[in-house]
Image (cartoon, helix red, strand yellow):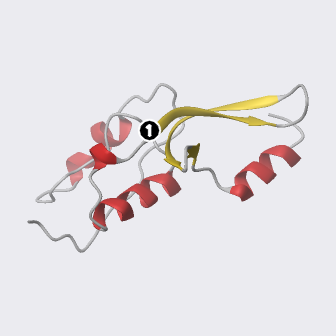
Amino acid sequence: MHRFFDFIIGGILGDYPPRNRTKNELTKFLLGAEIRNLGKNQLSTDNAVFVLKKILDGFSLNNLKFQNGAVIKINKVESIELPYYYPLINGKPRISKKLVAYLKKKRTF
């Protein structure tokens, strides 16, 4: 069993669909490092940290439940679709309450 002491979490976010920029532009510089990823779907950085912690706590990635995309309802007629992959907690996508509040207050998109 491998024991890891350092982690690089995150990558180059922003493109949807993802273009594998982290793999193509950054990973090649990690000489001698054992490279792992959390799958083909793009997670937000906070959720990547959450999933990594679950794995370190003994959970298998295959046993964690996820949802592809989420919708934040802004008001009766407006909503925002978020394209990322979300771990499910009690059947609901794990999204920061602060992010939801920020998106609801934002005037333009």
Of residues 108 and 64, which is closer to you in this image? 64
Q: Can you say which quadrant of the picture contains the N terminus? A: bottom left
Of residues 25 and 77, which is closer to you in this image? 77
Q: Can you say which quadrant of the picture contains the C terminus? A: top right
Task: Give percent across and percent down for residue 64.
Answer: 37, 47
Task: Give percent across and percent down for residue 71.
Answer: 68, 33
Task: Give percent across and percent down for residue 91.
Answer: 55, 44
Residue of label 1? 42
Label 1 residue SS = loop
Is residue 52 depicted above or below 20 in this figure?
below
> Which residue is pictured at 40% across the width and 35% down the height?
41
> Which residue is pictured at 88% across the width and 48% down the height?
105
Task: Give percent across and percent down for residue 76.
Answer: 91, 30
> Which residue is pictured at 84% across the width and 37% down the height?
74
Quadrant of res 50: bottom left
Q: Is residue 5 left or right of 18 when viewed as pictured?
A: left
Quadrant of res 40: top left
Q: Residue furthest front?
A: 90
Of residues 52 and 35, which is closer to you in this image? 52
